[in-house]
Amino acid sequence: MGYSVLAQEEYKIVDEKAKGMGKAVSLYKKTVAEFDKAKPFMPLIPSNYQDNFNTKYAEICKGRDKAINENKTIYFE
């Protein structure tokens, strides 16, 4: 979850300063990688925690994809 917060904060900084998208993309990718490492343990925890995990994972993947797409458009504008 710490990586998630870092990625989201970095993305906010990019919105304000209009630079540093590569770092935000990297943090999102690292966050997704850490969530993927935790997936095998999901069946061992209560369902309400699983739901929270799945929701956060979906948000992070959405943020990662958005950051990647915005990073691509920066170089083509």
Image (cartoon, grey):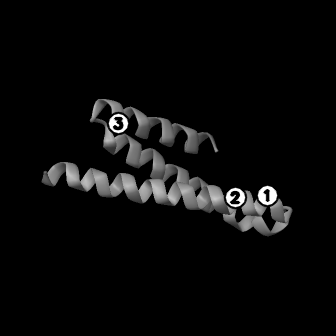
- The residue located at (20%, 48%) in the rendering is 74
Tag 1 and tag 2, C-beta contact below 8 Å: yes
Residue indicated by mark 3: 14
How far across and how far down the image is residue 76, in percent? 14, 54
- Answer with left or right where residue 14 lies relative to residue 55: left
Q: Which mark is residue 53?
A: 2
Residue indicated by mark 1: 49
Q: Residue type at mark 3: give it.
A: Val
Frontmost residue, 29 versus 52 = 52
Locate the N terminus by quadrant: top right
Quarter of the image where one finds residue 69? bottom left
- The residue located at (50%, 41%) in the rendering is 8
Q: Earlier in the sequence, mark 3 or mark 2?
A: 3
How far across and how far down the image is residue 48, in percent? 82, 60
User: Considering only vertical position in the picture, is 43 above or below 59?
Assistant: below
Mark 3 residue crowding within 10 angstroms, few (<14) / some (14–19) / many (20+): some
Tag 3 and tag 2, C-beta contact below 8 Å: no
Q: Residue type at mark 1: give it.
A: Tyr
- Mark 3: secondary structure: helix
- Mark 2: secondary structure: helix
Q: How far is the residue under mark 3 from the one under mark 2?
A: 26 Å
